[in-house]
């Protein structure tokens, strides 16, 4: 498998994980920590989004689209 195909596979995997991490939660629930010192769901989803951006930058030299 080429490097590009591996990066695309990683991107797809992280993208699915990102969407699954938010599925079934209300906005209010994503702000709640399950235990003290544990990150909330929005933090974890943000970490996954940052990983996606890193894959785009390192693998393809692309910047994410800016939302206006």
Image (cartoon, grey):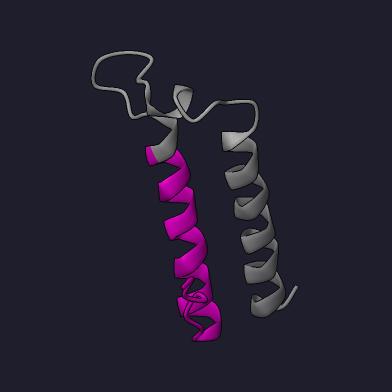
Given residues 8 and 2, the one toward you in this image is: 8
The residue range painted magenta reads 43-68
Q: Is residue 39 above or below residue 11?
A: above
Task: Tell me which corner region of the image, top left, top right, bottom left or bottom right, holds residue 3.
Answer: bottom right
Task: Tell me which corner region of the image, top left, top right, bottom left or bottom right, holds residue 60.
Answer: bottom right
User: Looking at the image, which residue sits at the far bottom?
Assistant: 61
Given residues 65 and 62, the one toward you in this image is: 65
The number of discs equals 0
Q: Is residue 3 above or below residue 50?
A: below
User: Looking at the image, which residue sits at the far top?
Assistant: 35
Decide whether the magenta segment is chiefly helix, strand or loop.
helix
For residue 46: magenta? Answer: yes
Left or right placement of residue 21 versus residue 13 in this view: left
The residue depicted at 49 percent of the width and 71 percent of the height is 67
Q: Is residue 4 above or below residue 29?
A: below
Q: Position of residue 59 (x, y in %)?
A: 54, 79
User: Looking at the image, which residue sits at the far right?
Assistant: 1
The residue depicted at 47 percent of the width and 80 percent of the height is 63
For residue 44: magenta? Answer: yes
The residue depicted at 62 percent of the width and 69 percent of the height is 7
Q: Position of residue 52 (x, y in %)?
A: 52, 62
Q: Position of residue 36 (x, y in %)?
A: 25, 15
Specify the quadrant that holds the N terminus: bottom right
Q: Is residue 9 above or below residue 56?
A: above
Q: Position of residue 12 (x, y in %)?
A: 69, 59
The residue depicted at 32 percent of the width and 13 percent of the height is 35
User: Looking at the image, which residue sits at the far front?
Assistant: 68
């Amino acid at each position: 498998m080429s490097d590009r195909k591996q990066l695309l596979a990683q991107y797809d995997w992280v993208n699915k994980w990102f969407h699954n991490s938010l599925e079934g939660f209300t906005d209010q629930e994503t702000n709640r920590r399950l235990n003290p010192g544990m990150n909330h769901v929005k933090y974890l989803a943000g970490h996954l989004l940052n990983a996606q951006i890193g894959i785009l930058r390192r693998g393809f030299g692309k910047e994410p689209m800016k939302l206006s």
